[in-house]
Amino acid sequence: MKRKRNLCLCFILLSIYAPASIRADDEGVKWLHCTSKKFTICNDANSMFSSYEYLDATGKKELTCRSGQRLLFKYEADNKKGNLTIAIKDPQQRTLWRIDIKDFNRGRKELNLKNTGIYTIEIKAKKASGSFNLSWEIGE
């Protein structure tokens, strides 16, 4: 838990207003072309929480999965301004599921994975303000 708090504090301090082309954390989330203001992110191997006053970026979390596994994905997001999209992509980067968050939304999606490889959870924020909480489980 201490490591998670330190990671959050680090991102809070570095992200008061921080434009960057690529920003990565130690749990494998990559933020591309990131411009943010008061951007806080906390994550671990199976979850991600973020709040932000302003975010214009694409975040990608890669998951290694095998054919026949099941991915259970849960989300809760509150988009106050701008656009927020959450998607799950297969190893060929084809979109398996996608949701555009307009305001507050909560739900879950279960996917039976057909291919072995790296699946991607992709978060796209365009001039967005709000927060999201994502979690996932991979099982047989």
Image (cartoon, rainbow, N blue to C red):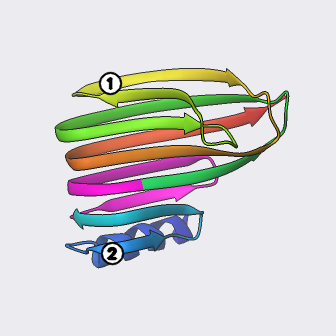
Identity, as a three-letter code, of the amino acid under mark 1: Asn
The residue wearing badge 1 is: 105
Q: Which mark is residue 120?
A: none
Identity, as a three-letter code, of the amino acid under mark 2: Ala
From what the image shows, is residue 59 above or below residue 65?
below
27 displayed left or right of 82 = right
Outermost residue to the left: 81
Q: Would you say the magenta stretch is mainly helix, strand or loop?
A: strand
Task: Please provide percent x and percent y for residue 51.
Answer: 29, 52
- Which SS class for mark 1? strand
The crowd level at tag 2 (other Cα within 10 Å; few <14, some 14-19, many 20+) is some
- Residue 90 sits in quarter: top right
25 displayed left or right of 90 = left
The residue wearing badge 2 is: 20
Q: Residue at x 36, y 52 (%)?
A: 50
108 displayed left or right of 76 = right
Q: Residue at x 51, y 53 (%)?
A: 60
Task: Give the magenta-colored segment's residue range.
Answer: 37-58
Separation of residues labelled 2 and 1 (CA atoms): 29 Å
Q: Earlier in the sequence, mark 2 or mark 1?
A: 2
